[in-house]
Structure formats: structure tokens, C-alpha cells
Image (tube, rainbow, N blue to C red):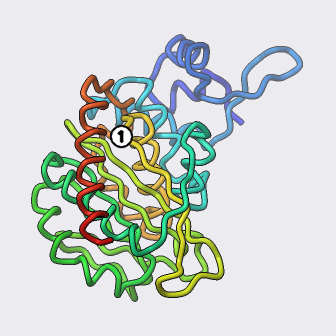
Amino acid sequence: MLTIGELATRTGLQPGTLRMWESRHGFPRAERLPSGHRRYPDGEVDRVLEVVRHRDAGLSLTAAIERALLDGAPPDAPSIFAGLRRRRPDLAPYPVPKRLLVPISHAIEDECSARGGGAILIGSFQRERFYRQAESRWRTFARSAELCLALGDFSEVRVEEVIEVPIERSHPLSREWAIVCDGPGVSTCLAGWERPGGEGADRVFEILWSVEPDAVRDAARIGIELAASEWPALRERVPAWLAEPAEPDDDAVQRATTLTNRMLAYVTAAS
């Protein structure tokens, strides 16, 4: 355990700066002695230095602290669907058969392709064979994206235009179908959890979808953390802006209308 003076010496910051951070942001985390003096776990040195590095990279103090606390921490949700249900209880799930989930997904993919330059794209495909059926589309999307991930039961990590991240079949993500697109001028996500017992055309998913920037940013962070827990090197590729709060979007209603029209067109064609 370190005194505030010792923490300041080891991090190069002033004690007053550390007190201000703790007062405003609850960081670094101190224990209090009966005398009221602060004592810091030794691990806080690395976290404070991580904040300094993120600040030097251009993040705001709030975003830098959030990023430092997330880095290296286990994900707080077992899957994208579960994470959205926990963080956004206002999003109501709807049952959708697999035969309609595919055209809905294609509509979202097209919307991301049309607007998603410089975005983060995440797809959870359950099985590698499902991804292979969509691989050519996703390779096209990846050319204009900043980061593109596919999660599924791949045999190994494959780093190309689309980064393939293996997910064990016992993992909760193996029961999910998800698409997340978060970036400048675009925010769309869909997460579907497969109900047990269905087979073939009878498979049914409970889906959540949103174009709200805050909800989509949550989905993107959850997806990144889940992928990074399986392949830690991914953290080095995540753009710094993902740690920032999502920008308000005055065009969200218009984009929701456009996306809904795309969905209806695909579903009608598939019916």
C-alpha cells in the first residue's frame, strides 16, 4: 500500500492532481486508514500511468480514466445481447424466426455499408460456416471500416481485412447473432439471442435493435471487450474514440426510418 506522496513520485504527478482526480472521478481508488490518510494498492500505479498515456494520446480525462479501468478487466456481460438487456432495459426484445433474421441483417449491413466509413463493425455469427456465407460482403465492408471483427467458432485468430476471433461453442456468444456498426455518422446495432429447442426453419431469436448512439456505443464496447478477452492483442487496434461518449445524433429518427424501410424491403422479398 502506497501513500499519496509515494504514488505521486512513482507516476510523476502532483499529489494535488491525484486528489482532484479522486474527488471528481473516484480515481485513483484509495483506502482510508482510521486516521483518514489515503493508502493506494500498488496496482494503482499502472492504472494512473495508463490514464496519463491515454491523455497524451488526446483523450479527455473522463474517457482516459474509463479506458484505463476497462483495459485488462474482464467483460461485465457474457454476450452482446445480455449486456444490452442489462444496460438498456428500455429496449424491448422481439421474437423473430431465423428465416427473417437473415434479411433483416442484410438490411443493417447495407445501411452500414452506405454510411459506415471509418466505423467499427462487429459481427457475431455463431458458426464459421455462417460467416463464410457472408464473407465476401464483410470483406467489402471492411475496406472502408476502421476495424472489422467477426466472432464465431473459428479454429484460430485470422488477421486480414476482417479479423476472425474464435469463440468456444460453450460461450454465451455462440447462441447469439449480432451486428454492430458504430462510427462517424452511423450507429446501428442488432443483437439476437437464440431460444433453445428450435431447429432449421423453426429457430427463433429474441432480438434487440437500436440506432441510438449511446446504445450502439454500449454494444460496440461490449463486443470489443468480449473479443479482447479471447484475443488480447485486439486492444492495440481499438481506436481511441471508442472510449469517448457517443455524440448526440439529430438524424437518428431519419436513419431509423431509412433502416426500417430497408428491413421491410428485404423481409418482403424473403416472404
- Give the left or right position of residue 184, taking residue 72 as reference: left
Q: Quadrant of the C terminus?
A: bottom left
- Give the left or right position of residue 205, taking residue 138 as reference: right
Residue receiving disc 1: 211
Indicate the amino acid at tag 1. Answer: Val
Q: Residues within 10 Å of mark 1 (few under 14, many from 20)?
A: many
Which of 89 and 169 lies nearest the eye of the viewer? 89
Instruction: Count numbered badges in the picture.
Output: 1
Which of 218 and 160 lies nearest the eye of the viewer? 218
Check the image and report above or below for 206 versus 120.
below
Q: Residue at x 20, y 36 (%)?
A: 185
Indicate the position of residue 64 as horizontal and vertical percent values: 41, 32
Indicate the position of residue 4 as horizontal and vertical percent values: 63, 22
Which of 229 and 51 lies nearest the eye of the viewer? 229
Q: To which quarter of the image does residue 234 belong?
A: bottom left
Indicate the position of residue 55 as horizontal and vertical percent values: 34, 29
Indicate the position of residue 51 as horizontal and vertical percent values: 43, 33
Check the image and report above or below for 127 versus 36.
below
Q: Quadrant of the N terminus?
A: top right
Q: Residue at x 46, y 22 (%)?
A: 13
The residue furthest right is: 34
Q: To which quarter of the image does residue 105 belong?
A: bottom left
- Give the left or right position of residue 10, taking residue 56 as reference: right
Q: To which quarter of the image does residue 169 belong?
A: bottom right
Q: Residue at x 51, y 27 (%)?
A: 9
Q: Secondary structure at mark 1?
A: loop
Which of 23 and 205 lies nearest the eye of the viewer? 205
- Give the left or right position of residue 151, taking residue 89 as reference: left
Q: Residue at x 44, y 83 (%)?
A: 153
